Image (cartoon, helix red, strand yellow):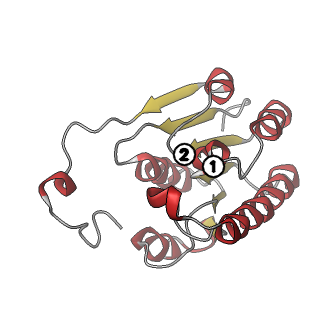
């Protein structure tokens, strides 16, 4: 393992941010690294990657701590519903900070954290502070749309996924095992 852990960001409006992070997870497991995936928005229901990751055994731990996607219809979200999402994100954030400082992991994926920051569920300043003060050897991947400039500036590698064409645009529903 390298002496200095890297910070990677997968962002943009295209498909594949989490999927790309999971590719790195597979590579890391193949090299004997211990991996934690902490999901900030996803609730842990119906995602094929969860079942697939279980098959990797104890090399990967996944914690789905979100309440599910709500921002596709943001104007329809009640203040009560938003409060539930913020509470869940804050609990996930505290868990993340504890895990980052535990020195148990070689790689931590912060799935959909960029969305959580963008919708003010988590403070960008707190995330920046954590990134600057993480254990030196720890690799981190931050996924989700709307990565903030402060996060991009700290990252070693930033990949932006952009939609060129998507089946949904032609009325094709999400395919089990491909989209979820």
Q: Position of residue 142 (x, y in %)?
A: 60, 43
Residue located 67% across and 44% down the image = 117
Q: Residue at x 41, y 53 (%)?
A: 19
Quarter-of-image position of residue 12: top left
The spot of residue 49 in percent (x, y) is 44, 68
Tell how many labels: 2
Q: Is residue 52 left or right of residue 58?
A: left
**Rounded to the nearest whole Å, what is the CA distance between mark 2 and mark 1?**
6 Å
Q: Is residue 29 above or below residue 78?
A: above
> Most extreme residue toward the left, as rendered?
170
Q: Which residue reaches farthest top?
A: 153
Q: In the image, is residue 118 above or below residue 82?
A: above
Q: Nearer the viewer, residue 12 or 17?
A: 12
> Which corner quadrant holds the C terminus?
bottom left
Vertical arrangement, residue 174 with respect to residue 162, above or below? below
Badge 1 element:
helix
Q: Earlier in the sequence, mark 2 or mark 1?
A: 1
Evaluate if marks 2 and 1 touch, with contact meaning CB atoms under 8 Å apart. yes
Which quarter shows the N terminus?
top right
Q: Residues within 10 Å of mark 2 (few under 14, many from 20)?
A: many
Residue 179 is marked as: none
Residue to which mark 1 is pinned: 113
The residue where tag 2 is placed is 143
Residue 76's spot in the image, x, y percent?
Answer: 51, 64
Q: Residue at x 12, y 55 (%)?
A: 170
- What residue is shown at x 17% (from left), y 54% (from top)? 167
């Amino acid at each position: 393992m390298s002496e200095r852990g890297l910070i990677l960001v997968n962002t943009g409006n295209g498909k594949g941010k989490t999927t790309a992070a999971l590719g790195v997870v597979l590579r890391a497991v193949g090299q004997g690294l211990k991996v934690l995936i902490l999901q900030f928005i996803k609730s842990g229901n119906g995602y094929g990657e969860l079942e697939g990751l279980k098959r990797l055994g104890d090399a990967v731990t996944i914690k789905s701590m979100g309440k599910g996607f709500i921002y596709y219809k943001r104007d329809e979200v009640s203040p009560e519903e938003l409060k539930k999402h913020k509470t869940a994100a804050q609990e996930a954030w505290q868990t993340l900070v504890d895990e980052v400082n535990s020195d148990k992991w070689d790689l931590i994926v912060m799935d959909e954290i960029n969305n959580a920051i963008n919708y003010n569920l988590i403070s960008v300043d707190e995330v920046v502070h954590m990134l600057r003060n993480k254990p030196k050897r720890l690799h981190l991947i931050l996924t989700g749309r709307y990565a903030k400039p402060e996060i991009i500036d700290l990252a070693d590698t930033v990949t932006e996924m952009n939609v060129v064409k998507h089946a949904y645009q032609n009325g094709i529903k999400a395919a089990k095992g491909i989209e979820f």
